[in-house]
Image: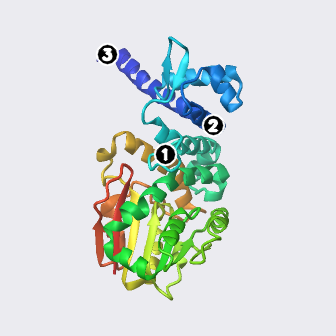
Amino acid sequence: MTDREATREYLDRFLGHAASAGALTVVAVADRLGLFSGLAQGPATPATLAGRCGVDRRYLEEALAALAAAGLVEYTAENGTFTLPAGAEACLVDSSSPYYVVGWAQILSALAGRVDELATAFAAGEGIPAPIYGDQLREAMARTNSPAIRALLVRKWLPTLPDVVAGLQRGIRVADIGCGSGTAARVIAEAFPASTVIGYDTDLASIETARSAGADLPNLSFEAVPAEQLPSSPSFDFILAIDAIHDMEAPQAALAAIRQALAANGCFLMVEPNAAPQLTDNLHPTGALLYALSTLYCVPVSRGGGSGGGLGAAWGPERAERMAREVGFGKFEKLAIQTRTNSFYRLAN
């Protein structure tokens, strides 16, 4: 291959990524305006969709063309209509679906708005406190993560821990570490009213959102406490942390505190990104997304004020087990739960 051919091949690859980034930015705007919900009502011309959604027709012409070119909506030239493809409604419209992923466009849009802060942090070797990313990212992360938690936590994930389910039905103490807006804690508290559930997070805005959403459940509460300061008395029978440990400034200290707070026969469910130990095994589109998120959010927030080591999202099962055993966990088991993005681990003393 000549240098010119190689350059053209690379250019094509780069423009493909640029096209995807542009399409997802249009998706973020379309989502904000309810365009996908409008299309879910049936095929529509730009004029028809403008009437459904209260949006200017000319803007819709361009946005729908962009989405059609990206393959995210279908275009029928004979009558000039646009349609959601099969499967799209579960991904873009139905927020109760575990496949609801439209929030990813909002996440990437929010992260793109932090380029100046990221460049400064990279140059100085500093961290970026999570609140700097703002409400848009906080909301987007909740929108992206919550549907699968609501749909699968009690129905699919917890049944892999039958002893935990039996305890939850009987009534035990539960801690949700890095609870965010509180979805997992609320789901457990609703499903198992005999159990007491406490969510912990350091983000005050998330804690306030969680408290507001869970105010109707007497067995649910939330505290603004770092994981490494998790109270150890009284102990917890079940602790879970969903996509949280790798974002912490002191993940080793957090694991140590969780082990200390866990009852003798207790169980810690740790959910972390699904990554192979070696970079060469992660060189695929899902790996690219994982490393991008880790670069733009996970490493910066885990470095905090500059003291954190920046564990990163792709720390993988081998390092996770090593760190867990270093703080005293005697049992570390990867559970047989299959998802595209996450791995599930059972830890015990």
| Quadrant of image for the N terminus | top left
In space, the residues marked 1 and 3 are separated at their CA atoms by 44 Å
Mark 1 touching mark 2, by CB under 8 A? Answer: no
Q: Nearer the viewer, mark 2 or mark 3?
A: 2
Q: Earlier in the sequence, mark 2 or mark 3?
A: 3
The amino acid pointed to by label 3 is Thr
Q: Is residue 109 above or below residue 138?
A: above
Label for residue 34? 2
Instruction: Please name the residue that numbered disc 1 is placed on.
Output: 100
The structure residue drawn at horizontal position 52% and vertical position 64%, both measured from the top left corner, is 308
**Where's residue 63, x and y in %?**
60, 25
**Where's residue 347, x and y in %?**
34, 73
**Where's residue 162, x and y in %?**
32, 73
Label 2, residues with CA under 10 Å away: few <14, some 14-19, many ≥20? some
Instruction: Please name the residue that numbered disc 3 is placed on.
Output: 2
Q: Earlier in the sequence, mark 1 or mark 2?
A: 2
Q: Earlier in the sequence, mark 1 or mark 3?
A: 3
Q: Is residue 321 above or below residue 172?
A: above
SS class, disc 3: loop
SS class, disc 1: loop
Q: For residue 289, which quarter of the picture?
A: top left
Label 3, residues with CA under 10 Å away: few <14, some 14-19, many ≥20? few
Q: Is residue 18 left or right of residue 269?
A: right
Front one among 17 and 214: 214
**Where's residue 102, x and y in %?**
53, 42
The amino acid pointed to by label 2 is Gly
Q: Nearer the viewer, mark 1 or mark 3?
A: 1
The amino acid pointed to by label 1 is Tyr
Front one among 243 and 218: 218
